[in-house]
Amino acid sequence: MPRIAILGGGVMGETLLSALVAAGHRDVVVAEKFTERAEALRAEHGVEVVDPRAASRGADVLLVAVKPQDVPDLLAEVRPEIAPGAVVVSLAAGVRTTVIEDALEPGVAVVRAMPNTPALVGEGMFGVSAGASAGDDQVAGVVALLATAGDVAVVDEAHQDAVTAVSGSGPAYVFYLAEAMVEAGTAEGLDEDVARRLAAQTLTGAAALLTSGDEGPAELRRKVTSPNGTTAAAIESFDAAGVRGALVAGIRAAARRSAELSGS
Ligand SMILES: NC(=O)C1=CN([C@@H]2O[C@H](COP(=O)(O)OP(=O)(O)OC[C@H]3O[C@@H](n4cnc5c(N)ncnc54)[C@H](O)[C@@H]3O)[C@@H](O)[C@H]2O)C=CC1
Ligand SMILES: O=C(O)[C@@H]1CCC=N1
């Protein structure tokens, strides 16, 4: 099993740590600069938490899970420790593989991955792109590691802004819909805890239908919608208000913002 260094033990770092340990990886070390956070990770996961250079020394895979603005300093710090055959996997939104490659010794393999927060419960979605010097076997190894926390799609790096807009930010759109369902339910007289339960299980069930069979979202929606019934009343109201167009425009705004943040 590869030796894995997780650089940054925040939300994503801890998520991957939990998933990898649960999948049987034992050779995992974490670097986390905040002492309290480091203590919490040691106590919760029984993992070694050291400084970034010590974590990177001898690692086969380095998972970079610090905020995008902290990536350059971190890479400058760990650069001398990275073994020539290692793979550096960056989870940082909007940081291009060329930027990471330029910060490392020539030839170090770089892979970029856009995660999302459902990885916390093993239901993440990762969009993965290979940098110029990452070989197919190295990419396959990274895919297998990330698959411990969800599904993994390999995409051309030119599509990372679209991935960020659809699945990276995507959970927030679903929570936004859930907020609206709860608001409507309570406005119709339900207790908030009941409305939340109805909304959450409806989203879980609908997602399970989407991922379990061959039917796409349009077909699944058609099956819920009786002619002249309640669903039709809701969808007509959404369409009259331009909800679908607004959602498409909003998600495309996320893609544009992702491109801006990555400097393209
Ligand atoms: N949370 C999310 O929904 C998503 C996060 N990401 C990406 O994942 C990355 C991590 O995000 P989060 O985990 O949410 O951030 P976070 O702020 O929870 O975690 C980052 C951790 O890195 C630590 N850190 C910073 N510099 C360090 C250094 N030099 N050495 C050791 N530790 C250091 C911080 O103390 C912090 O605990 C980001 O680059 C973000 O773009 C990407 C998509 C979704
Ligand atoms: O909102 C953001 O910028 C980050 C990227 C994807 C999810 N969160």
Image (cartoon, rainbow, N blue to C red):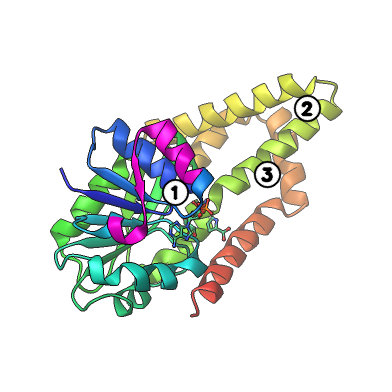
Q: Secondary structure at mark 2?
A: helix
Circle 2: residue type: Gly
Q: Mark 3 to mark 2: distance in Å?
A: 14 Å
Say which of 118 and 27 sits in front.
27
* Magenta stretch contains residue 52: yes
Residue annotated with mark 1: 9
Q: Residue at x 77, y 50 (%)?
A: 240
**Which secondary structure dominates the residues rendered in magenta?**
helix
Q: Is residue 10 visible?
A: yes
Say which of 72 and 199 sits in front.
72
Location of residue 238 in the rendering, given as x and y in whole percent from the top left corner:
73, 46
Mark 1 lies within 8 Å of ligand 1 (Cβ measured): yes
Task: In the rendered structure, find residue 180 and report the number of the disc placed on it.
Answer: none
User: What is the crowding at mark 2: few (fewer than 14 residues within 10 Å), some, or many (at least 20)?
Assistant: some
9 lies above or below 70: above
Location of residue 62 in the rendering, given as x and y in whole percent from the top left corner:
29, 57
Span of residues in magenta:
37-54
Circle 1: residue type: Gly
Sequence-wise first label, 3 or 2 = 3
Q: Mark 2 to mark 1: distance in Å?
A: 38 Å
Task: In the rendered structure, find residue 176 and report the number of the disc placed on it.
Answer: 3
Q: Is residue 55 left or right of residue 202?
A: left
153 lies above or below 213: below
